[in-house]
Image (cartoon, rainbow, N blue to C red):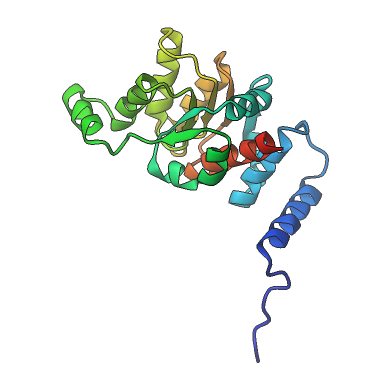
Amino acid sequence: MMTEGPVIVKPEEIEAESFRMIDAEVGPHQFDEQQWPVVRRIIHTTADFSFTEATEFSFAAVPRGIDVLRGGVKILCDTNMVLSGINKTRLAKLGGSAFCYVADADVAAAAKEQGVTRSIMALRKGVAEGCTLFLIGNAPTALFELMRLAEAGEVDPALVVGVPVGFVGAAESKEALYRSELPYICCRGRKGGSAIAAAILNALMLQAEA
């Protein structure tokens, strides 16, 4: 007996059908027409509908993100996994660039010397290099450091995507971001990760291209 193959095999049709299924399962929701494509992309990436409850946007976060992307922006990723998930072709067309410094030798040396995480030092390097859009999918210490630098007036983030995953400091860092005055997109609680951070940016870029 032969196993039947998939009914749909074209990638764009698979994605369209996936989105149709997500829309049908979620039904009416609290998100506006710019926020929903972001949340839907998160669900599409994770197959986890709990993100309809966990995802939060500061006022005008999506329009702000779209505007800065259209202007060409320097983006800091907290891990190379986040960086690898970004659609580089689309970002280049928008005039933007993305970086991750966590594996740099100077970052590792400075972190060891100062007794802090490489994520903290990589975040500081990103700020020094002029990054203004931040994708944090793994490192709560980076998110806490970004908020500290912003409070000190050392950086003025255009948008913070704060979705670190894990148990130690992850939920707490996102709650601090949620209570802050920074422009943010975050997923409250323990869930998050590289794929979600990249998915959020990719969803914003699709809108920026429109």
Pick out the residue farthest to the bottom.
Answer: 1
Q: Residue at x 53, y 41 (%)?
A: 198
Residue farthest along the left direction in this orientation: 113
Quarter location, residue 199: top right
Tell me which residue sits at (57%, 13%) in the image.
Answer: 181
Q: Position of residue 6 (x, y in %)?
A: 68, 73
In this picture, is 150 found above or below 75? above
* Nearer-the-camera pick, 18 or 129: 129
Q: Is residue 155 above or below residue 1?
A: above
- At x 55%, y 16%, the residue is 182
114 left or right of 26 in image: left
Q: Is residue 201 above or below residue 12?
A: above
Q: Nearer the viewer, residue 30 or 172?
A: 30
Q: Position of residue 36 (x, y in %)?
A: 73, 37
Q: Position of residue 133 (x, y in %)?
A: 50, 26
49 vs 134: above or below: below
- Is residue 42 visible in the rendered image? The answer is yes
Q: Is residue 113 left or right of residue 52?
A: left
Quadrant (top left, top right, bottom left, bottom right) of the C terminus: top right
Query: Which of the two residues, 183 or 191, is positioned nearer the viewer here?
Result: 183
Left or right of residue 185: residue 103: left
Whether residue 191 is visible to the viewer of this picture, yes or no, is no
Question: Residue 93: where, in percent of width, then height?
Answer: 57, 39
x 33%, y 24%: residue: 125
Q: Residue furthest top?
A: 153
Count of marks overlaid on the render: 0
Give the position of the N terminus as an image quadrant: bottom right
